[in-house]
Image: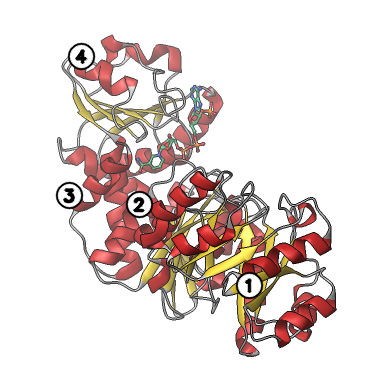
Amino acid sequence: MIIVSITGPSMPAALSQMAASRRYADMFELRLDLIERPKIDQLIAHSRRPIIATCRSVRQGGAFGGSKVLRSRTLEEAANLGAQYIDIEYDANSLVIKRHNDSSGPKVILSRHYVDSAPRDVRRLFWRMLETGADILKLAYYAHDAADIRYAIEFLRLAAREKRKAVAIAMGVAGEATRILYRKFGGWATFAAPESGKAAAQGQLTARTLRLLYRAHALSRSTKIFGVIGNPLGQSRGIFVHNPLFKTSQVDAVYCRFQVKDLSAFMRYVSSHLAGFSVTIPHKRAVMRFLDVIDKSSLAIGAVNTVVRRHEKLYGTNTDASGALDAIEEVTVICGKRMLVLGAGGAARAIAFAAKERGAEVYVANRTGRKAKRLASELGLRAVPLEEVQKVQYDVVVNATSVGMVPNPMNSLVPKNVLRGKIVFDAVYNPPLTRLLQDAKSVGATVIPGTRMYANQAALQFKLYTRTKVRKERIRRLVEKVGD
Ligand code: NAP
């Protein structure tokens, strides 16, 4: 069930939130602590969905500063007016909980919120909450890292074992997956925002996103989980590519974002739930030590961007390299060409390695010169100082640095005169037409945007994840649509 939290703050705003999100909502939660002078009867009459009445205290992350008695009275009023569920906080008087449990009135959701941390002992908490006899048990806490979602998974596992309805949500960006995967882990429902910018809690997704992008309502225990791990993940487009592809290819899978700071903790506590994942900055190299098998090219590149689980073994590979080179080879044959690669990070390593493999003469230049020298000596390439790139003639110029990426899209490392008549490829895909590519176009060069590389590498990943082929044009359209 997708429950939409109605937050107001005014009555007209609350009513319009209901109207805007009704088609995506199975139920509404009235946040009576956030709506000013709520007219509960009007809200219920307008809802056309079952109602949860909630009056969250300041201590539990809400805005209600009154006494417990007043809070209880507000909920009683909502119950009398027809709310089907009332949210009672864990610290409420046990007699109040018992009275509501015993009554034939609304069902009780017993909730426990940790505003800025995870529960210290999730099992103990679960058993204590269970003892109250409440109909539905709800845990919400703050996740600082994706590894923290394990507490929500554990809470739901215990509830399923005891055949109890439960909700477990990790708030914050790092907990996002728990809002999507509730059905996968046996949860009763998830909570969603009515519109963007109207979230009742940190990291809350809109009901529309949950339903249309993630199809959260249609996932089940057998759904395979994929995702991207990295930090930060703001630029990541994988969710907008893989989820629509799963849908059209009728693959029972979902792709989520996992904001991972502590890679060891994630691999230990969460990765076993995933059937595969993409790896981005800063974990492409570090992830290698957790894998069972790594292919030869990825070992030589020294970075893995794709991990798949096969028969309980983790296989690592790198789709960046062929993603980029295939994009360039759509316009020219690489063998025998002179190529300048700007950068000495993960993408530059992958591209330079693959270009040499395909017969190019590769030059590398980087802001930190010693890194370019090291890369050149490791892979058998030539290093040139960044200030001297004009001195050599190239056929292909590749930007594999983050220069030109939002929020600084007007930056470029290469003077226009170096680009005249060349083939210019930019690995940066946000924006799709970077300053470098604009300059290149203006002097008659052939340009290849980073979205091409992204689409190629995503197509390879999708095939590895699902053993299903998709047309590159379809992926390209999805990638370019995100940039609109
Ligand atoms: P990385 O490992 O962090 O390397 C970053 C590179 O950018 C380094 O060479 C760094 O130079 C250079 N750099 C950063 N800021 C700079 C500045 N202000 N001036 C000059 N050089 C600067 O990152 P990565 O994984 O290689 O990614 C690089 C870019 O490729 C990113 O924009 C990423 O989004 C893009 N990418 C695209 C795709 C795709 O599918 N299209 C796939 C992978 C990556 P120093 O060594 O001096 O720090």
Residue 92 x %, y %: 81, 69
Is residue 269 visible in the rendered image? The answer is: no
Ligand 1 has an atom within 8 Å of the beta carbon of the residue at disc 2: no
Badge 4 marks a residue whose secondary structure is helix
Dot 1 and dot 4 residues touching (CB under 8 Å): no
Q: Which badge, 4 or 3, comes first in the chain's sequence?
A: 4
Q: Residue at x 56, y 46 (%)?
A: 231
Residue 459 x %, y %: 27, 56
Dot 2 and dot 4 residues touching (CB under 8 Å): no
Judging depth in this view, the residue of 407 and 141 nearest the camera is 141
**Amino acid type, callout 1:** Asn
User: Circle 1 is placed at which residue position?
Assistant: 80
User: Circle 3 is placed at which residue position?
Assistant: 473
Q: Which badge, 2 or 4, comes first in the chain's sequence?
A: 2
Dot 2 and dot 3 residues touching (CB under 8 Å): no
User: Gap in Å between the C-alphas at discs 1 and 3?
Assistant: 57 Å
Badge 3 marks a residue whose secondary structure is helix
Q: Residue 48, located in which quarter of the rendered image?
A: bottom left
The image's mark for residue 442 is 4
Judging depth in this view, the residue of 198 and 308 nearest the camera is 198
Q: Nearer the viewer, mark 2 or mark 4?
A: 2
Q: Nearer the viewer, mark 1 or mark 2?
A: 1
Q: Nearer the viewer, mark 2 or mark 3?
A: 2
Judging depth in this view, the residue of 376 and 113 nearest the camera is 113
Decide: few, some or many residues near mark 2? Use Cα within 10 Å; few <14, some 14-19, many ≥20: some
Q: Quadrant of the C terminus?
A: top left
